[in-house]
């Protein structure tokens, strides 16, 4: 008996320890829910690995008294997480894709883009206005949003409303709406509300004719070290091909326009019958001036895990080696072509003025 016991103990000592993958995330409840969902998928795919979640605060979480567009920092919600990635304190980071700049710092890449949830914006109404729409809100009602993109489009569409900045995580913004009398409604991403389980708070979903969405909105991105092939292979299986191609087109459009959160730029994409449709627009800060257009490209959506070239460089900060290169390039070219079309129609002037006005206020 004792001999068997010793043999078992020796076998246990000699067995390889379970590898621990450390996953970085922001501390907010929504960020944790998003990260937990990605980790749950990875655990199911890799039962032999252990996952440890490491939560931290970012600049965007700490500066709550200034509009996002005024802070002048491109990586508001990503910088601290990227520092942890750089120092090997975490192996991968889960982000809302719309928070990731189209140009990442050297040494990083987006190793996975998960299947997109509803990318549209939603209106959450103060309890006394439940049942209303933006159109039927009383004259001079105040609507809260931290986004220049939303404010510019909605001011143009609903001139009887006033739009004011509201900051904080989802919980904070909903509390400000419900407990104070300042806001009649606030605009939030539908995907975030759904992930929080707050479907019942969605009073109105805004369609593209009313308000196009942010580049990458509704999708989650997994950022990794660009040279960490093990982790790239590990997370690469999370790529959703259609979401990937739509987001490559959107990010290429934004990058070529040189847009960011300090100017109102918005998109809408759809995939139908082998065609990728991309609509993009730019607005002046007050929404009075705008240029938008739509282009399409024939793009075969590949089945996942088709073998692609071995040594793909990044496209708009994304590495997707298990998706064929051709469709990715076609999506990127569509984004660049639409940006060039808008620039030829005067988009640069609108964006330059919007930047100057935003910086001046």
Image (cartoon, rainbow, N blue to C red):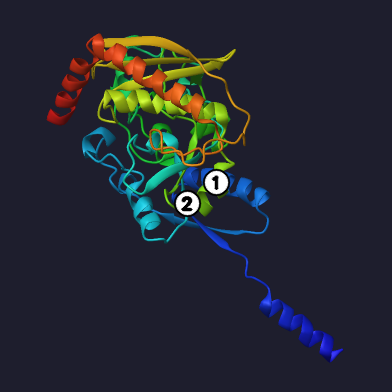
Relative to 336, is 41 on the left or the right? right
Q: Is residue 3 above or below residue 131?
A: below
* Contact flag, marks 2 and 1 (Cβ < 8 Å): yes
Which of the pair 134/285 is nearer the observer? 285
Residue visible at 73% across and 78% down? 11
Helix, strand, or loop for circle 1?
helix
Residue 227 position within the rendered picture, expressed as x and y whole percent measured from the top left? 43, 51
Residue at the limit of the structure toward the bottom, as seen here:
2
Residue 337: give its label: none
Residue visible at 32% across and 33% down? 166
Mark 2 closeness class: few <14, some 14–19, many ≥20 residues within 10 Å = many
Residue 235 position within the rendered picture, expressed as x and y whole percent measured from the top left? 55, 46
Residue 128 position within the rendered picture, expressed as x and y whole percent measured from the top left? 46, 23
Residue at the limit of the structure toward the left, as seen here:
360
Which of the pair 97/246 is nearer the observer? 246
Q: Is residue 172 visible in the rendered structure shown here?
A: yes
Q: Is residue 190 visible in the rendered structure shown here?
A: no
Residue 235: give its label: 1
Residue visible at 68% across and 55% down? 47
Estimate the spatial distance between the alpha carbons at disc 2 and disc 1, rounded to whole Å: 9 Å
The answer to which image quadrant residue 333 occupies is: top left
Mark nearest the camera among 2 and 1 is: 1
Look at the image and tell me in which quarter the N terminus lies. bottom right
Which of the pair 229/293 is nearer the observer? 229
Residue visible at 47% across and 14% down? 297
Residue 154 position within the rendered picture, expressed as x and y whole percent measured from the top left? 35, 16
Helix, strand, or loop for circle 2?
strand
Residue pointed to by mark 2: 92
Q: Is residue 110 above or below residue 158?
A: below
Mark 1 closeness class: few <14, some 14–19, many ≥20 residues within 10 Å = many
Q: Earlier in the sequence, mark 2 or mark 1?
A: 2
Look at the image and tell me in which quarter the C terminus lies. top left
């Amino acid at each position: 008996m004792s001999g068997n016991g010793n043999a078992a103990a020796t076998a246990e000592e000699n067995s390889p320890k379970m590898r621990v993958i450390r996953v970085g995330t922001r501390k907010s409840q929504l960020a944790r829910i998003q990260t937990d969902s990605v980790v749950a998928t990875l655990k199911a795919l890799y039962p032999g690995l252990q996952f440890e979640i490491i939560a931290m605060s970012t600049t965007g979480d700490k500066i709550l008294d200034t509009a996002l567009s005024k802070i002048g920092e491109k990586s508001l919600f990503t910088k601290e997480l990227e520092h942890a990635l750089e120092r090997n304190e975490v192996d991968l980071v889960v982000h809302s894709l719309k928070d990731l700049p189209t140009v990442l710092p050297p040494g990083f890449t987006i190793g996975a883009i998960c299947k997109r949830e509803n990318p549209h914006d939603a209106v959450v109404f103060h309890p006394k206005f439940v049942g209303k729409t933006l159109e039927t809100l009383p004259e001079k009602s105040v609507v809260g949003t931290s986004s220049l993109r939303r404010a510019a489009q909605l001011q143009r569409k609903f001139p009887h409303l006033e739009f004011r900045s509201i900051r904080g995580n989802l919980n904070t913004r909903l509390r400000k709406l419900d407990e104070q009398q300042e806001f009649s409604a606030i605009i939030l991403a539908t995907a975030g509300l759904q992930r929080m389980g707050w479907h019942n708070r969605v009073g109105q979903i805004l369609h593209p004719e009313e308000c196009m969405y942010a580049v990458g909105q509704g999708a989650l991105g997994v950022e990794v070290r660009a040279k960490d092939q093990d982790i790239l292979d590990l997370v690469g299986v999370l790529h959703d091909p259609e979401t990937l191609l739509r987001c490559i087109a959107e990010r290429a459009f934004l990058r070529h326009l040189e847009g960011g959160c300090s100017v109102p730029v918005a998109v809408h994409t759809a995939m139908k019958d082998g065609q990728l449709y991309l609509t993009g627009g730019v607005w002046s800060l007050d929404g009075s001036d705008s240029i938008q257009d739509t282009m399409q490209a024939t793009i075969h959506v590949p089945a996942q895990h088709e073998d692609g070239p071995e040594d793909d460089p990044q496209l708009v900060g994304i590495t997707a080696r298990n998706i064929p290169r051709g469709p990715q390039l076609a999506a990127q070219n569509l984004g660049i072509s639409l940006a060039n079309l808008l620039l030829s129609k005067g988009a640069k002037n609108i964006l330059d003025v919007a930047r100057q006005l935003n910086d001046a206020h």
